[in-house]
Image (tube, coloured by chain):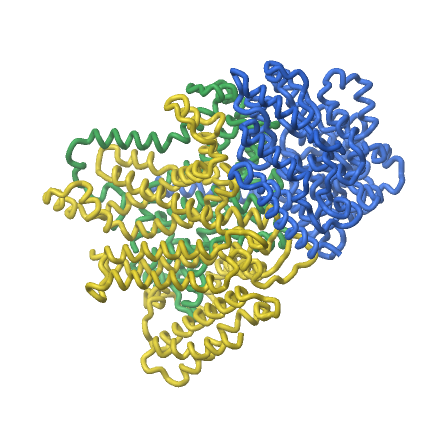
Amino acid sequence: MHKKLLLIATVLAFALIAAACSSSSEDTTTTAGSTETTAAAGGEATTIDFWVAFSDEARLGFANDRAAEFNEKHPEYNIQVTSFSSYNDVFDAAVLAVDSGEPPALIHFFEAATRQALDAVGSDGAPVFKSVTDAIGGRSEILGEPVVLDDVVDAARNYYTVDGSFYSMPWNTSTTVMFNNMDMLNEAGITEPPATWADVDAACEAVMALADAPKACITWPNHSWFVEQSLGQQGELLANNDNGRTGRATEVYLESDGMMNYINWWKDLNDKGYYTYTGIQRDWDGTSNAYLAGEVAMLVYSSSDTTFFDENADFTNVASFMPRNQDVDYVGNLIGGATIWMLDGMDQTTEDGALAFLNFFSNPENAAAWHKLTGYIPITKSAEALLADEGWYDESPNSKVASDQLAAAKNTPASLGALLGDFVGIRDIITGAIEDILVNDVDVATRLAQANTDANKALTEYESLYGG
Amino acid sequence: MAGAGLSPGVQKKTFFRGRQWPYHLSLTVTAVVIAFPLLYAALIATQNNTEIFAFQLTPGSALKSNFDAVWFGRDFAGAMWNSTIQTFVVTIGKTVLSLLAGLAFVYFKFRGKWVVFFFVLVTLMMPTEVMILAMFRLVSGFGWQDSMLAITVPFLASATGAFLFRQHFANLPSELLEASQIDGASPLQFLTRVIIPISWNVIAALFVIQFVYTWNMFLWPSLIIRDENKQVVQVALQTLTNIDGALTYGPLMLAAIIASIPPAIVFLLMQKPFMSGFAIGQNK
Amino acid sequence: MLIGLIVAAILGPLYVWQNNDRPSAKRYGLGSAIAVLGAAVTPIAMGQCAFAAETTGVDHLFAYTLMAGGAWLALIALQSFFDRADGKKSESAAMTGEIRTGGFRMGWWVPWALLSPTLIVLIVFLYLPAIQTFTLSTKLTRLGAPKSVDVCFGNFTELFITDPWKLVAYPLIAVGLIYGARFWMNRSEPGTLSRKGADVATVVAMLSVFVALYAMFSPGGGEQVAYRPVYVTTVIISVGIVAFGMIGGLAVAYLAFRRIRGGSLYRTFLIWPYAISPAVAGVLFFMIFDPTAGIFTHTMSSVFGIDVPNYRHNAFMAQSAIILASGWKILGYNILFYLAGLQTVSHDQIEAALLDGASTWQRFVKIVLPALSPITFFLLVTNLTYAFFEVYATIDFMTKGAPAGKTSVAIYEIIRVGVNNGDLGRGAAQSVLLFAAVIAVTLWQFRTSGSRVSYGGS
């Protein structure tokens, strides 16, 4: 009995000490880890909170390193990077933080929720975010950092320009490309990466006829982004009012010919056993694993991981444009990724610091380094030029495919992609329908009609809360 | 101690008659089957992806690098620390609050007692999960998101704990109270000097239940804690499913094992008092 | 709405008449008034929205149901007040623990001070969110949205079929079946329901409730939400976990309760998964079942030559995997309780049965099972709670609700709708349904454990 008492008492004592430590450490120090700060020598540095939706070492590390460099260069500022596990987490946390009075200065947020970010208001009804263009106000440099906003490549600039204003600073920007296991394709007698759906069909027939045929021929994540890309390629709108770009979108079109073509092709590949579904929606990891493990010959994916595939594939890995529908004229692929949004309501000093950091963050050297690290496109024209001068594209030709594909796009509302309220929810409806079609073998037209009803209901409801 | 269900010393009867080895055999097999998922995870935790894909059945070469990836690469230590603080604050807070409530229910007469009793009783059918959306809004409204307050304060009160102690106190001999009233002890002195020293088994039972419950909490922290530096260990496991763009099984399994060590230790160390405390709780 | 209030005014006194011996006129009056008041709470709180011009029969139905519920609760409260006034020691009064005559005689505020921390936390973090859940469930709103729209019962009606007559008929049929079964099993010896009869009646009752709810939830289509699949998934996974966890737990406990050398060591090795978290259970079984790297698929194909379907495509495999992982995790808990329960089974009874030459199985069914029934019942409820809520983490690690929602149980769906899609109103409405299920299970536990005790026989 005594031993037990002693044990319990020890545990309790430990607990009390732990509790005491925690309450005192909470106020005085910030936890180490992903936060890297350089204290200003003398004088209080202005803290600029930057919330990032990456938690992996490489990409979060990049943000941390740039923040440290900036802090060193501008000791009067202290950029604090905080890591979150998803865009939704960052966004919700930011909206809540606005209401509780301690918002960050910059948040990292994804393209699909651009409308949502523009609509975001605090509990006082004032907008949460401020247009970066307006804040820069035509200056060509801020705190000695040259403004690079005007230099951003067209595809990204056009996507994020709403009502004539370029709202947020693009960071990680990519498009969909296809990665090809050329060893396997060559073995099947295919010498060039397939460019069209028909080419893919033919290549798959050949690959699956091989004696040592892989599990399946092709895969890509069940993510609505690929659907949106295909609509852009085929020149079809996802929503009315020019994809929500000449006015608020109030209707979505999930039963269009472009939709039917793409989903039917997808289902056909799946039924023939050419396409393999990992069974999880938005499964980036599972699909990339399947490609690297040689379970498929082709992978349609985000260009963001080009470097990763180049480094990790133990076969000849060649990137090519996303396969397109050969029966319609090609219009254009769109971008995806995320931008950095600036919160409204900061004092001039803080805001200038935040703006200076944004322009520093994407200056040609940093943008080029980011591209090399990941495969996201170089976000400015000067970064592209820098990379070309360095001979980077000769060294790794796969890295150029994404930029080339975006440059080939015609600048139409279809290829810009949609600005849509509750886009996240609508994307969910789309992926849910596709999963149903692939897994449960339901009729494409019927299922898309239901998805269309559901999506329009979601949009109407969103508009009743945020619209006009 | 009366009615201690599992304590072996009570009924000093003979061992089970008949051949014992079939039971030993089947129990060993069962124990191994139950342990299999953990043993398998322990194996995987030592391997790198190549070894895993080769279905190697001997320990691999990557334990050190897996550990580094978990502990230093992802600051799993920070998450363990957060969970530790959360668990101790909740567990101790709950025990104290439950003791006080039990004391009030058993050793005081006051108007409206039955109303209060029902008020607490009804919360037994109000699991936090069914009101989690409203709770999320409420607690965010306090500005508590990403803070330790959000994952401790809402869980400090416990109907289970209050009833457990109420039941236990009610079964204690009433002479205890009379004796201490003669001494002129205050209720708190009575609690700390008389009641607590003879209630360690029940306290330990509640401690184990609450420790395991709090340490294993997942849904609520995953909603209210977004800042990765403040995350608790169960949710932090999720960030380990993807390290640098690929699924890495070894670190994930290692982290799962590490995350299970504290509740397992508490459970094993306090198994005996836990079980006899349970027997009291179950006594009716 | 007026009709509802009038009916309440009439039924109130009837309830009083049924539950009291020759009640006074005052009590009849009170019964009537309280019933009307209880019934009126809902329409007052909801601003009579359910009876507005554009509403449907289903809306009315919801309103009347809630009015009836309000009146019923108010009458129960009134009755317990009467009982106390009559000095009847109701069960509840005994339970509140008028335990000893003694006690501290101190200021009235002392017990309140001792209770206040508990009460404050319960009010702020349980009662308040509970009320807010109900309010939210009648709104269309999003996290951070500048405004919200009142939708009355819209978030609920879209989960059900649209025909109000069927919505009334199915529960009535279920109730009819339940009472019919009791009556039928009762017919030979009225008044005393045999154990077997009670079991059959319970099974019939459970099946009727399951089927009636199945028929009432909407299969989707049009503007309706497909909630029936969620319900089916929840039932399959919950029943699976409870059955696997409890049968497995009992089997292992029956094996381990005998007094043999090293018994307590074995017990420790059998019950430790109790300390494992649902999240870790998910992680461990995620590894085992992983289609490319997991041992399960590999062993099945390389050793037995069976190509198991990928559990992320195949609904049966996915649900089985979740059930296995969760059942494994809760096994330790069940073994723990069954071991404790088996110690109380009388050894003399077992020895006597042994002398009779009863087979092991007969002994088990005739002696052990009945003696364990209180514990079985307790475990049934705790396991069900586990299967309703804690399974969330396991699912989140293993399948994330896939394939095509086949493992998206009620709690998973609430988070998907309410948090991931930010649709707070709909999420809250689904929460209210789950809340109702929890209350139903708990009340059933109270009622049944009350009646079980009476024919426990020991």
Q: Along the line of sight, which residue is nearer the eye, C46 or A221? A: A221
Specify whether C312 is left or right of A351. left
Could you tell whether B203 is left or right of C314 in the image?
left
Chain C: colour as depicted: yellow
Q: Quadrant of the N terminus of chain A?
A: top left
Residue B165, above or below A368: below
Q: Is residue B234 visible?
A: no
Residue A152, percent from left and from top: 81, 33
**A141 displayed left or right of B157:** right
- From this viewpoint, which residue is outermost toward the bottom? C25
Q: Which chain is blue?
A: A
x%, y% of residue B92? 47, 48
> Is residue A178 something one can see in this rendering?
yes
> Between C236 and B119, which is closer to the camera in this rendering?
C236
Q: Position of residue C173 (x, y in %)?
A: 38, 62
Q: Residue at x 43, y 38 (%)?
A: C316
Among the 4 quarters of the image, the one containing residue A433: top right
Q: Report the front residue among A303 and A341.
A: A303
Residue A187 position (above or below residue C363): above
| Residue A252 to residue C22: above or below | above
Asked whether, in this view, residue C398 is left or right of residue C98, the answer is right
User: What residue is at 45 percent from the left and 21 percent from the top?
Assistant: B55
Image quarter for residue A306?
A: top right
Tally of numbered discs: 0
Q: Is residue C166 above or below residue C305?
A: below
Q: Quadrant of the C terminus of chain A?
A: bottom right
Residue C109, image x, y percentages: 48, 67
Tell me, what hue is chain B? green
* Viewer-side residue, C18 vs B70: C18
